[in-house]
Amino acid sequence: MDTASLTGKELAAAINADTKARAATLTEAGTAPRLALVVANDDPASAWYVNSLRKAAERLGIDCDRIDLGAHASAEIIRAELAARSADAAVDAIMLQTPLPAGVTLDDVSSSIVASKDVDGVSPLSLGLLAAGLDGFVPATSEAVVELLKHHDIPLTGKHVAVVGRSNVVGKPLGQLLLAENATVTIAHSRTVDLPAVTSAADIVVAAAGRIGLVTGKHVAEGAVVVDVGTNEAADGGIVGDVEAESVRGTASALSPVPGGVGPVTTALLMRHVVVAAEKARAH
């Protein structure tokens, strides 16, 4: 079986074109959309990602401020900064970059981001709005999976989707989004007994556990669609996913590449969220 590539580059380009046009309209009307990137680490991979976000914002006409709190910032300092940016009318959107300092979790600080500016959907309130089916910002990676499948005309209604990973930033919110698309969803994780039996029963498998090569050919039914959300650092310094791509090709009908699949769409959606937040703020 030929395995199609679920590339995200064309979809990301289309989203970015729309975002750039909407940002230009806001700028012409008064002020450009503004994103505050709050960083409290000295992680090289995080620095690379933050830099890529700043470049993406610049290309799209979005002002982007990096606020560096240092790798030893306390939860109190991070919460205070997030609260201050939430109260600042000049800031439309806030993103808190991970990892956080030792001893500080996202749960400790994310509630300090007001929901209207929580463009990566990390706060308990944003996650609650999603679970209730109400309007709010969705974690961009989860949204990217659904948008990528739709872009490639892969039906979701009535399909069985196995999501491997139960994080609050991908697995759990993705389950909610898939349910909203009328899919039947199984959330699998590190304690799942006989993972291959669970995933091979699914029409679509989404690998989002953050473990290199977790999903192999034995995990995938003939003709299933596989979406690889993983972004793991390989021994050679490159980026690899959670799927052992070579063992899946020939069995899966389609597979998203890493890099070039979910990643570009995630960044594009995050930037679109910034513009949406700005549009809503200007409308008030």
Image (spheres, rainbow, N blue to C red):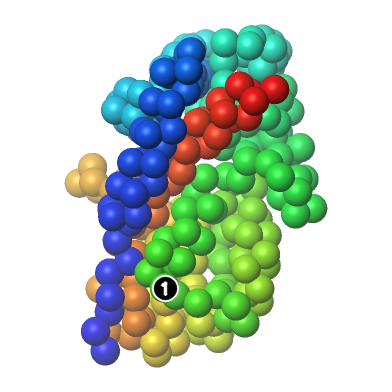
Q: Is residue 159 above or below residue 129?
A: below
Pick the residue in front: 41 or 262: 262
Q: Is residue 84 above or below residue 53?
A: above
Reading the image, the residue beneath label 1 is 153
Residue at 43 percent of width and 26 percent of height: 25
Point out the image quarter for the C terminus.
Answer: top right
> Which secondary structure, mark 1?
loop
Q: Amino acid at mark 1?
A: Asp
Q: In the displayed orientation, state which residue is furthest to the front.
A: 29
Residue at 71 percent of width and 50 percent of height: 130
In the drawing, does residue 221 fall left or right of residue 102?
left
Quarter of the figure with residue 224: bottom left
Q: Is residue 47 above or below residue 4?
A: above
Res 244 seen here: no
Pick the residue in front: 62 or 105: 62
In the drawing, does residue 23 fall left or right of residue 14?
right
Q: x, y (%) of residue 182?
A: 66, 73
Q: x, y (%) of residue 125?
A: 76, 37
Residue at 68 percent of width and 60 percent of height: 176
Q: In the displayed orientation, state which residue is furthest to the left.
A: 236
